[in-house]
Image (spheres, rainbow, N blue to C red):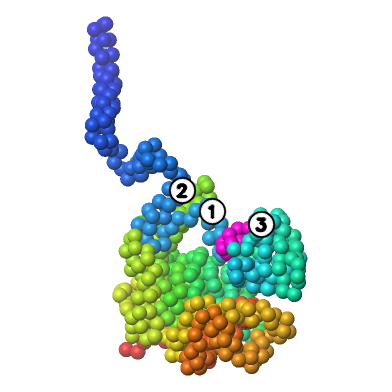
Amino acid sequence: MNDERRQSTGSRLTPLLMALCVILGILIGTFYANHFAGNRLSIISTGNNKINYLLQMIDQNYVDTVDMNDLVEQAMPQILSELDPHSSYISARDAEEASEDLKGSFSGVGISFSMQSDTATIMSIVKGGPSEKVGIMPGDRIVSANGLSLVGMDADSVKTHLKGEKGSTVRLDIARRGHKDLLHFSVVRGDVPVNSLDAAYMIDKQTGYVCVRSFGDHTYEEFMVALAKLNTEGMKQLIVDLRGNRGGYMHIAIQMVNEFLPKGRLIVYTEGRKSPREEYRSDGHGTFKQLPIVVLVDEGSASASEIFAGAIQDNDRGTIIGRRSFGKGLVQQPMEFKDGSVVRLTIARYYSPSGRCIQKAYENGHGEDYENELIARYERGEYFTADSIKQEGEAYKTSLGRTVYGGGGITPDIFVPEDTSDVTSYYKEAVFSGYVRQFAFNYSDTQRQKLGQFPSWRQMEKYLVAQKLPEQFAAYAEGLGLKRRNLMLQRSHTLFERAIIGAIIYNILDMEDYQEYLNTADPTVLKAQDILKEGKSFPTAPED
């Protein structure tokens, strides 16, 4: 019996002894490998362990002191850049500001400013906002905040000192034209709205116009309020301007385009390696299912803008006018770390109703080449002739059988080229140097009282045309070192006049007045009006 018990105990201990021997062997082997093989890593070979071990080696052995947190912050974007151009890392410091445009509000003093001669100069005041309540005015210059001089700071640093927790107070010292001494204001920070619609007005007696700048938390509500207002003013047809709109939340674009589609129409679907196909269809509750609609796009229209335009085009619901859109067909999901930093990771691709993915080609780790693709379009003449558009993607069919293409963005149904016929080197230098904007601001600032008497931009424009502003600008710019070119000034006279007057209208009035002024001579907007007047906004099936 004792022999059997001893044999049983021995058999149970054998696996344990073998495991201990294996562990001891690994430890001895690791010691000799590290000691005699130049500290080569033999056990830790998987990717994630190698990264962790690398950081440990740097922290413990590097010749100089290293801020490990800063090193990680720098490494994160580099790692994500190897995936695709839209997966990104946002530090905790920048995360809140990066989401402000989409949140719909932030806590601040309620002003818009630009840097003029190293000083933050107020361009506009949010109506009903904290600054307006205490009497701060456009044209005021912010000298200091809470006793700290802001003169000489860059715009981002100034923003940091103006923003703060809701209900907190910031003391501002203001220099105002006509006042010898500084003015002092105590401003209680509050919620400042971030509007995602730049303009919404009746462009003629029947046509409503809405310019959507981004797709944020409150864009759908803003959009519906704007359409309701235009409806009461007699809107029978609509222009939706998405030019320069870099996108935002996909579900907001889906909600908005749903208003124009009959029940059961596919709006978009998404699919990825770990994300099964998910379809989004119209529910039939839209208010404007029969309203003639034209959508304007250009190379700056991306992401959610392309979802909206793609759904309208593939369902043959309206006409797309302008130039080929950016070409972003990747879906990012924000994932937040405990410290407030965020990774926006691409988890899927989205596909328009015809089945096309409009994502343009990219090479991992070459983000600069990806962004420079727009320059390549310009250089090959795509902004000027439709024949220069390179269609490298697969062909698809809309619901009526019209041909559309995947890859490289949404190609408009009607192409409108960029007009550069009157652009001269003198005009380009004047604009790119910032002299035009600077002249317009100085003129607005010195003539603010006079210009503030005009109740509308049309009356202001009439007055400004009589002031011969291009000639005044030429003399102003020459004093700054830009040689006057009379022949080029004459050829680009209309461009100079419109650029200067537009900037002055923006400085004195608001964004909607500025946009309305620009639209009066915008070839893409004028083409959209023609299509609507001719009753051709609804696409027709191609002939055999």
User: Mark 3 or mark 1: which comes first in sequence?
Assistant: 1
| Relative to 324, residue 462 above or below | below
Residue tagged by mark 2?
Answer: 70
Span highlighted in magenta in the image: 153-161
Most foreground residue, 540 or 360: 360
At label 1, which amino acid type do we have? Answer: Arg
Q: Is residue 343 above or below residue 38?
A: below
The alpha-carbon separation of the residues under discs 3 and 1 comes to: 21 Å
Query: Which numbered mark, 3 or 1, is in the foreground of this view?
Result: 3
Counting other residues with Cα less than 10 Å from the Cα at mark 1, is it few (<14), some (14-19), or many (20 or more)? few
Q: Residue at x 51, y 88 (%)?
A: 484
The answer to whether 535 is drawn above or below residue 136 in the figure is below
The quarter of the displayed image where residue 478 is located? bottom right
Q: Considering the image in quadrants, where does the N terminus appear?
A: top left
Q: Indicate left or right for 535 with 354 as reference.
A: right
Residue annotated with mark 1: 93
Q: Can you see residue 105?
A: no
Q: Which mark is residue 148?
A: 3
